[in-house]
Amino acid sequence: MVLQEMRLDGAKLQKKLRDFVKTYQWQTCLFIVMAIVVIVTFCNASLYPSEIGKVVKVQTEQSGDMVNYNSEMENISEPYYVQKLTIKILNGQYKGKKVTVSNEFGYSEVDTERYQKGDRVFLRISGEEQISSVSITGVKRDQYAILLAVILIFLVIILGKGRGVLSLCSIGVNIVVFVYGLVRYEEGDDLLKICAVMIVIFTVGTLFLVNGVNKRSLVAIISALVTVVITMSIFLLAMNYGEEIDYAALDYIVGNQELETIFIASIAIAGLGAIMDVSVSIAAALQELIMRKPDITFRALVHSGREIGYDIMGTMMNVLLFTYICGLIPLMLIKMKNEISLITIIRLQIPFEICRFLIGSIGIVMAIPVSIGIASIVMKMGRRRA
C-alpha cells in the first residue's frame, strides 16, 4: 500500500514537472543553455595556451613587518605574510601534477595578492621535461565575470522578454561601435570626430532598438542630441574663459598624448545615458497625455512635462553621483589609509571626476526643458495635422 502511494506521488510529481516544462518551455531551455555556458567556463582551462592551476592547499604564516614609507606622516609598518601554496596544474603537458609555490603579501594587499583554496591562477612554468620553477602571474576570474553576465542576460530576457532582448542587442551594438571607435583612433583618426559619431550612433541605435522606430523615439533622439550640443557648448565656454587645466593628476597619462582632447571626449560621453533616459521619459509621458487628452493646451502640456522632469531630475543626478563614487572608492580609501587628507585627494586627485559629474548633471537639467519643448511642439503639431 505504501509502495503504491509512493508510485502515485512519483507519477504526480513527474506530471507536474512535465506541465511546468511545457508551460515554461523557452524559459527552461534558456536556463539550461545558460547553465551549460557557466559550467563550460568553470572547466575551460584546456582552451588557454598558458598553464592554469587550482590552489588545493594553503599554509599562511606571518613573516614580519614591513615599513610603508609616507612623506606626510611618520613611517607606518604593516604585517607581511608568506603563503605556501599547493597547486594542481589543470592543463598543458604537466596536467595533473602538483607543485608548491611561495607567495608573500602585505596586510593591505595594495600591490600584493592573497590566494585562497579553490582559486584558479595563471602559472609561468620553466622547464621542458621536468619543472624547474613555477610562479603565479595572476588570478583567473573569467568564470565569475561570465556567471554575472549570464545572470544578467537571463533576468533581462525573462523579465523583459522581447524588449529585454532588444536592450541586450543595443548593449552589444554599442560595445561593437565603441571598440571600432578605439580601432579608428589607433589608426590615426581624430578623436573628437570619432566621439561625435559614436554619440549619434549610441543615441539613435539605443533608442530605436529599445523603443522602436516611432515618433516618441525620434523626439527623444532629437532632444538628447540637442542637449548634448548645449551641454558641451557650456563646457567649452567654461574651458575657454576659465583658468588653464592642469592634467598632471590624470590617472591615464602615458607618453605624449593629447590630454585635453581625451578629457573633452570623456566629458561628451559621460552623461549620455542619463540624458537619453530623461528624454525618453518625458517624450513618453507627454505622448501619453496627448493621446488621452487631445485637447490639452500647450501650456498645460509644458507644466506636466516640467513636473515629470522635477521627479526624475534628482534621481538621475544621484545615479551619476553614485556611478562616479563607485569608481573613486578604492583610490580614495587607499590614499586615506596612507594618511593623505581628504581635502588633498579632492583638490589634486579627483577634480576631473567632479567635473564630469557637474557637466553630466547640467546635461540632465538641460534635457528637461529641451525635451519638453521638442516633444510638445512635434507631438502637438502632429496631432493637429492628423
Image (cartoon, rainbow, N blue to C red):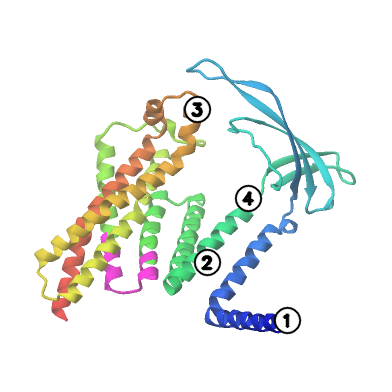
Residue under numbered circle 4:
141
The 10 Å Cα crowd at callout 4, few under 14, some 14 to 19, many 20 or more, is few
| First in sequence: mark 1 vs mark 4 | 1
The residue located at (26%, 39%) in the rendering is: 238
| Distance (Cα) linking label 1 and label 2 | 40 Å
Residue 216: x %, y % from top left: 27, 70
| First in sequence: mark 1 vs mark 2 | 1
For the question of whether residue 220 can be seen, the reply is yes
Residue under numbered circle 2:
154
Residue under numbered circle 3:
337
What secondary structure is marked by label 4? loop
Instruction: Identify which amino acid the numbered label 1 is placed on.
Output: Leu
Instruction: Identify which amino acid the numbered label 2 is placed on.
Output: Phe
Residue 208 lies in the magenta-colored region: yes
| First in sequence: mark 1 vs mark 3 | 1
| First in sequence: mark 4 vs mark 3 | 4
Q: Is residue 265 left or right of residue 306?
A: right
Closest to the camera, between mark 1 and mark 4, is 1
| Distance (Cα) linking label 2 and label 3 | 39 Å
The 10 Å Cα crowd at callout 2, few under 14, some 14 to 19, many 20 or more, is some
| Distance (Cα) linking label 4 and label 3 | 27 Å
Nearer the observer, 175 or 195? 175
The residue located at (51%, 25%) in the rendering is: 338
Q: Main secondary structure of the magenta part?
A: helix
Q: Are marks 2 and 3 in contact (CB under 8 Å)?
A: no
- In the picture shown, does residue 116 fall above or below 157? above
What secondary structure is marked by label 1? helix
